[in-house]
DNA sequence: TTCCAGGTGCATA
DNA sequence: TATGCACATGGA
């Protein structure tokens, strides 16, 4: 075990397998904040945790510690995954080294569905601010933070309410999708095969192939998925393409056939690697 | 001012 | 099946 769980905290003993910056800043979660002292506050559904550093160790503190043990996917061996991916190509070796502490979070389906509808043609800073506005507008006040809204709470919002928050053309997508979800048990999607799950998700308004992949990956931990966005397009054309390719379906097909059931992991290492490098 | 952001939906050929 | 364009908004 690389971590120790107690009643209200988890101590990460091996920081080669857990780096908060890598985990939180690789684009899979929008509800986190870095504090002035370097610690992080992370929110998911109606739960909250803080991550602080103590020498070579990280401490995750929360009153819902079992939830966050699962949330951070602590039972998966990422050393093994990185080792397999590194052997695939030089760029994967570099990417897994660069984002060595990445872990794919296990997040609530409803929160991922709404958040990634908001993500369409949007930038990460703005997605974060819109998700936070949504929580403040109709999520439960937990004292020191606002919970992500429940389906019932989301159902109280009109298209105009959503527009006033700044959702733009996504307002009607969210409005329509939360209504469709009244008839659906989102936990039932856990038992589906990859294609069936993606197919269902794409029947929802505002969800196309890329957003469906993100939801499957971050809410259902389906590692057969490889979301292709502008950044993955850059990754593909920089490191994998024989000739320039803009067709995202073709890019996805080739990359999933390269990485198989480790696709989701590979996607996050590559996304984080390319995006951070281009920022500099 | 113009461009761009973790795309999708819809019309057209 | 494939391509092109509109869609809101705010930061760089």
Image (cartoon, coloured by chain):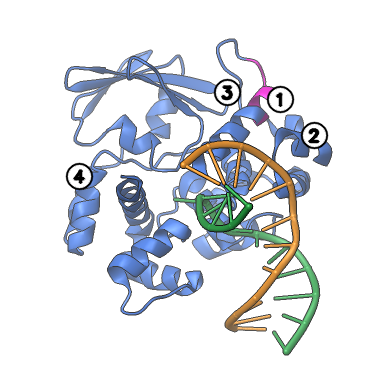
Chain colours: A blue, B green, C orange
Of the residues tagged 2 and 4, which is closer to the observer? Answer: 2
Report the Cα–Cα distance between label 2 and label 1.
9 Å
**Residue A191 location (% of width, % of height):** 54, 52
Magenta segment, which residues? A134-141
Q: Residue A101: which quarter of the image?
A: top left
Are discs 3 and 1 located on one and the same chain?
yes
Report the Cα–Cα distance between label 4 and label 1.
41 Å
Residues packed near mark 3 inside 10 Å, few (<14), some (14 to 19) or many (20 plus)? some
Sequence-first tag of 4 and 1: 4
Judged by its main secondary structure, the magenta piece is helix
In the image, residue A251 above or below residue C3? above
Of the residues tagged 2 and 3, which is closer to the observer? Answer: 2
Q: Which residue is mark 4?
A: A79
Report the Cα–Cα distance between label 3 and label 1.
15 Å
Judged left or right of residue A194, residue A149 is right
Residues packed near mark 1 inside 10 Å, few (<14), some (14 to 19) or many (20 plus)? some
**Residue C5 location (% of width, % of height):** 70, 69
Q: Which residue is mark 3?
A: A46
> Which part of the image, by quadrant, shows the C terminus of chain A?
top left
For residue A161, the mark is 2
Q: Residue A61: which quarter of the image?
A: top left
**Residue A161 location (% of width, % of height):** 80, 34
Sequence-first tag of 2 and 4: 4
Check if mark 2's residue and mark 1's residue have beta carbons within 8 Å.
Answer: yes
């Amino acid at each position: 075990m690389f971590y120790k769980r107690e009643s209200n905290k988890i101590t990460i003993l091996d920081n080669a397998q857990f780096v908060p910056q890598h985990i939180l800043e690789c684009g899979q979660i929008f509800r986190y904040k870095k504090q002035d002292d370097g610690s992080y506050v992370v929110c998911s559904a109606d739960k909250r945790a803080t991550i602080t550093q103590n020498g070579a160790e990280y401490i995750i503190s929360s009153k819902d510690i079992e939830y966050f043990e699962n949330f951070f996917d602590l039972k998966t061996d990422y050393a093994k995954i990185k080792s397999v991916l590194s052997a695939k190509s030089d760029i994967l070796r570099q990417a897994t080294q660069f984002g060595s502490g990445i872990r794919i979070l296990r997040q609530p389906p409803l929160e991922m569905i709404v958040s990634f509808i908001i993500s369409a043609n949007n930038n990460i800073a703005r997605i974060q601010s819109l998700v936070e506005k949504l929580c403040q507008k109709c999520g439960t006040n937990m004292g020191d933070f606002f919970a992500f809204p429940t389906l019932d709470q989301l159902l109280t919002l009109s298209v105009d309410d959503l527009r006033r928050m700044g959702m733009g053309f996504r307002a009607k997508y969210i409005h329509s999708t939360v209504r469709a979800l009244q008839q659906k048990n989102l936990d039932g999607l856990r038992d589906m095969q990859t294609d069936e799950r993606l197919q269902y998700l794409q029947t929802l308004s505002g969800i196309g192939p890329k957003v469906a992949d993100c939801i499957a990956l971050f809410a259902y931990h389906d590692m057969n998925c490889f979301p292709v966005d502008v950044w993955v397009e850059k990754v593909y054309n920089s490191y994998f393409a024989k000739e320039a390719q803009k067709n995202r379906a073709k890019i996805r097909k080739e990359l999933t056939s390269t990485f198989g059931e480790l696709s989701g992991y590979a996607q996050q290492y590559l996304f984080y690697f390319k995006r951070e490098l281009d920022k500099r």
